[in-house]
Amino acid sequence: MILNKILKNTLLVLTACLILSACATKKEVATDIKGQMQGDVYTGTDTVEYLAEGVPDRVFFATNESILTTASRETLRAQAAWLRKNPGINVVLEGHADERGTREYNLALGERRANAAKDYLMTYGISSDRITVLSYGKERPVDSGSNPLAWSKNRRSVTVKAN
Amino acid sequence: MFKKIVSIFLILIPVNAFALIEVDITRGNLNPLPLAVSPLSIDEISKKSFQKILDKENIGSEISIIVENNLKTSGLFNPLDKRAFLQAPDIANLKPRFEDWNLIKAQALITGKVNYVDDKLRVEFRLWDVLAAKEMMALAFTTVPNNWRRVGHIISDKVYERLTGEKGYFDTRIIYVSEEGPKTQRIKKLAIMDQDGANNKFLTLGNELVLTPRFNPTSQMVTYLSYFKNMPRVYLLDIETGTQEVVGDFPGMTFAPRFSPDGKKIIMSFAKDGKSDIYTMDLENRIVEKITNHPSIDTSPSYSPDGKYITFNSDRSGYQQIYVMKNDGTDIKRISFGNGLYGTPVWSPRGDLIAFTKLHKGKFYIGVMRTDGSGERLLTENYYQEAPSWSPNGRVLIFYRETKTNAKGEGFSAKLWSIDLTGYNERQIKTPTDASDPSWSSLLSN
C-alpha cells in the first residue's frame, strides 16, 4: 500500500519533469525561429547600422562573455576589409554591457569586449594606431527594455568612425 | 570647512553616568523606544531675529522637527505626537513634570532652548530619563544661524550616542549621481545633500557622464569617474574650492576609485587590452603602484579601515567573486563561495564585515559577510540594486535600486535606499531627481 503510494508519487514527479523539460525546449526553439537570438547572443538587425554597404557596425556577445561568435568574426572581417580600403579613417570601438551587472564590473567588461573586436581587426591587418577603445559599461543601452532580447542588443561592441 | 563652523562650546552640567534607558541596536528593533521631542523654546526677540535671518517662523520647533525625523528614520525610536504633550516647552526645559511625560508613555524626553546672541544661534538641549526622573545629558552649541539644520543633526547624534552607546550618523552628507532623461541617453551629475535629503546641490553640470563618487575620510574631497572629453578617467574634486584634477596619467580607462583610510592614496582599476588590474596612486608624491597583475577583471577595490587589507571583486575563477588580499597585493584569497555572482565589496568602518552585491537567479541582493567570507547574510532582494555604502558607524547601508521597464521600455527609475545592518528598516531616501551610486560621508563633527 505504502509502496504503491510512493510509486504513484514518483510517477507524478516524473511526469511533471517531462512536461517541464518539454516546455523549456519548446521555448528555446521559439526564440531561434524568431531569428533574434542564438543562445543569448543577438542575431537580429534591429539596431545595426552600416559603415558602408555590407559592413555592419556592431557585434554582439553572450552574457558575461567577450568571445566573438562566427557571425561577429564575419562582421569584423568586413570592417577590416573596409578599413584597409579607407586608410584615412580611424575608428573608436565602443564596448557595452547589459544592465544585469554591477556598474564597475560592466565598465571592465565593456572594455574587454571592445578589445576582443580590436584584436580581431588587428589580426586582419588594421594597425592599433587607428583604433581607440572606449567602454561605456551599461551606461548607454541601445534598447531600454528589461528583457532578455533587449539585454542581448545591449551586449555589443560598436565600431564608430573617429574622423 | 564643515568642522570649523560648528563648535560645541560647553557641557552645561555633568550628569551622573548611570543610564537606565538602553537601546539595543544589534538586532532588528521591533519596539522602538517611545520618546518625546519637545519643541525647543524660544523668546520673542530671538524668534523675530531668526525670522529675519532665516525666514523661518519658529526656528526652535524647526530644529526639533529635524531631531524627531532623524530619530524616527533610525528605526530605533518612536517620537510621540506633539499634540499629546502637556507641558509647555520653556517650563519643560527647566524642570520636566515627569508624571506628565510618563502619562503619554514617553521613556525619554528632549527639551531645549534657542537664543539669539551676538548674531549667533545658541542652542542648549537636555535629554531626560522619564522613568528615573533624571537628566541624562545637557549640552549647548553656538554657531552661525545658517547652521541650524546641522545643530539639529548634532543633537540627534548626541541623543543616539547616549541612548545606544554608539556614535550616530546624522551630521553627515551623501554624495551621489543625479540622473535624468531617457535610459538610453541618461544625463548624470554629481550631487551632494545632507543625510536627510536637505540642502541638495549639484556639483557638475551634466555635460559629461560621471559615475561612482566617493568621499575621502574628512569628506572634503571626492574621487569619481568622469567621461570628460570621452576619456573615462578617475578624477579628484575638492568640494570647497570646486577644483578638479585627473588622477594619474594612464594610457586608458581608470575607474572604480576609492580613498585609502588615511586619505593619502587613491585605489582604482586601470583597464588595458581587455584586462583590468588594481593600482594605487599616492596623492602627495604621485607614485603609482600596481597591486594586482592577472589577465582577469580585478575591480571595485576597498580598503579595510586599518589600511592593511584590500577587498575587491575578480572573475579570475571564471565568474565575478569577492577576494581579500594584503595591501601590497600578496596573499590573495577568495572569500565568496555561495551560489551566484558577487561584486562591489565594501569594508565596514568597524572592520568586521564586508557588504556586497550578489546576483543570483535573476535577482540582486545586498548582503554582508565576515571578512573571511563566513556568516553570509542577505539583507534585501530586488530586480536590480547594487553599490552599498556604509554609514560612518557601520550600522546602516545606503545603496541604489532600479526598476524594471515595461514592454515599451518605459517606467525606468533609479532611487536611493537605506537599510539597517539587521535587515530591518528599509527606507527610500528622497532625491529631487533619480539617483544612483551613493556614498556616505564621515561624521562632520566629532
Image (spheres, rainbow, N blue to C red):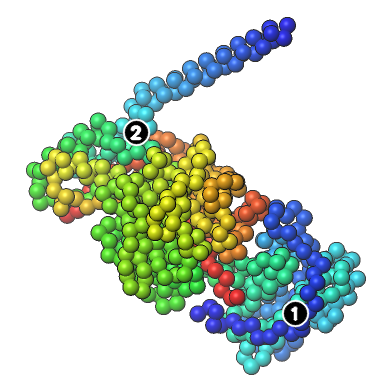
**Side of B190 relative to A16 (left or right):** left
Q: Is residue B379 visible?
A: yes
Residue A115 in the image, given as x and y percentages of width and height? 26, 46
Locate residue B219, reporting x and y percent.
Answer: 49, 71
Checking the image for residue B138, the label placed there is: 1
Identify the image quadrant of residue A74: top left
Instruction: Judge whether B62 appears above or below A25 on screen.
Output: below
Circle number at residue A58: none
Residue hosting label 2: A41
Examine the rendering and report whether any part of residue A110 can be seen.
no
Query: Crowding at label 2, few (<14), some or many (≥20) Cα neighbours within 10 Å?
Result: many
State the quadrant of the C terminus of chain B. bottom right
> Extreme bottom residue here?
B118
Q: Amino acid at mark 1?
A: Ala
Q: Amino acid at mark 2?
A: Val
| Cβ–Cβ under 8 Å for marks 1 and 2 | no
| Label 2: element kind | strand
